[in-house]
Amino acid sequence: MAPQTSIPVSANVLGTIGTIFWCIQLIPQVWYNWRKKKTDGLPGLMMFLWAICAVPLGVYVIVQNFNLPIQIQPQIFCVLALTSWAQILIYNNGWPVWKATTLAIGTGILFGSTQVLLILTLRGPYERGVEWPMTLVGVISAILLASGLIPPYFEIAKRHGRVVGINFVFLGMDWLGAFFSLMALVAQQTFDYLGGVQYLVCLLLELGIFASHTFFLLRSRRLRAHAKTANIPFDELPEAAKYVYPRPCDPYTENLAFPRPDTSASTEAGGVEGNGGEGVVERVTTADSEKELERIRKEKEAVREKRKSAVSEKRLSAGAGRWPVRDGPCAV
């Protein structure tokens, strides 16, 4: 396809709207990560692939002479993706702030230099009618963009459809940015199919993430209501264990989502044991009724018995007097 020679006003307006969304899309996610001081469920590979994707995407839209807002999009997209990637290195991997920041800045400089070099190299042949290099760049960009949205599905699968760590304000703004950018391409005099495929893939994969969490909310509505009634966090319900990763399987394994049991502790309400049982931190010291306390006590005893049995079996299989080391998430 020949370079765009005249850009309609509608394409510039739609492209500007898309750029505005993509300029601020990752700000809610960055703030969310900073406030929580953790990035569980947000894959670092997702952000790094998106940052790489900005290089061929920027080359493609600049050489093709798309409208100016769309040419700016990949640059901002890369900066925000690298920022979020650095946060994941800090909060999830335990990197020092200076080390993660230096790596992110150095990577951004490398990506920017590569993009400039490719633009200078490919612009001449493209203007002379050699289009296959630009087609290849567009295909690589589309593959990287789609690949970046695949790692979240593995995290979702670990939690049986539950989305954790991804801010839905960010996801919604990203979806709107892709939508208006796609409409900007439609408004141009000639529609670029490779550019359109990139935005369409982004729209469909993000819709899948929204749909997955919606189904989770529908499936778990009774459990969430039960947790609210009992004044217990959803993640600490034994019945909700399959929606938590890592899953609590042994009170003596490492990296558990639940606290280590402390059967010596007790609460002020009726002598109910504190952090024992299913690992639920007792929060009903002033329960509304004795019936509710009795129900919770029975649930604790039932789960505690199951855990004792499971731990005994693991001790026999691992050898006398040795606790097994965590070897992966439990099957639920």
Image (cartoon, rainbow, N blue to C red):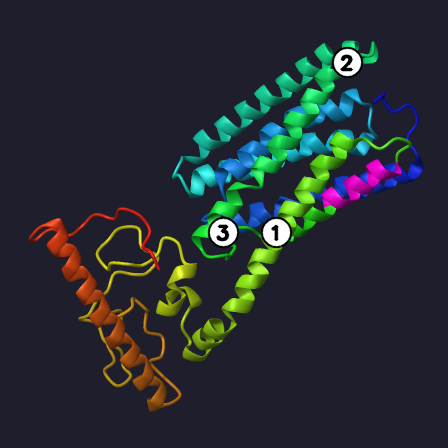
Q: Nearer the viewer, mark 3 or mark 2?
A: 3
Q: Main secondary structure of the magenta part?
A: helix
**Residue that label 1 marks:** 208
C-alpha gap between disc 3 and disc 1: 11 Å
Question: In the rendered structure, which amino acid carries the disc numbered 2?
Answer: Arg
Q: Nearer the viewer, mark 2 or mark 1?
A: 1
Residue beneath the point at 23% across and 69% down: 306
Residue linked to disc 3: 156
Q: Residue at x 59, y 62 (%)?
A: 214
Mark 3 / mark 1, whichever is N-terminal: 3
Does label 3 or label 2 sit earlier along the sequence? 2
Q: How many marks?
A: 3
Report helix, strand or loop for mark 3: helix
Q: Is residue 138 above or below residue 43?
A: above
- Residue 47 sits above or below residue 117 on the image: below
**Label 3 packing within 10 angstroms: few (<14), some (14-19), many (20+):** some
Asked if the residues shown at circle 3 and circle 2 are in contact, with their CB atoms under 8 angstroms apart, the answer is no
Q: Quadrant of residue 292?
A: bottom left
Alpha carbon of mark 3 to alpha carbon of mark 2: how far? Answer: 41 Å
Q: Residue at x 30, y 51 (%)?
A: 255
Q: Which residues are magenta?
A: 177-187
Q: Nearer the viewer, residue 134 or 30?
A: 134
Q: Which residue is mark 2?
A: 123
Task: Report the amino acid beneath label 3.
Answer: Ile
Answer whether labels 3 and 1 touch (C-beta < 8 Å). Answer: no
Q: Quadrant of residue 25?
A: top right
Say what amino acid the circle numbered 1 marks. Answer: Gly
Residue sitting at the far left: 320
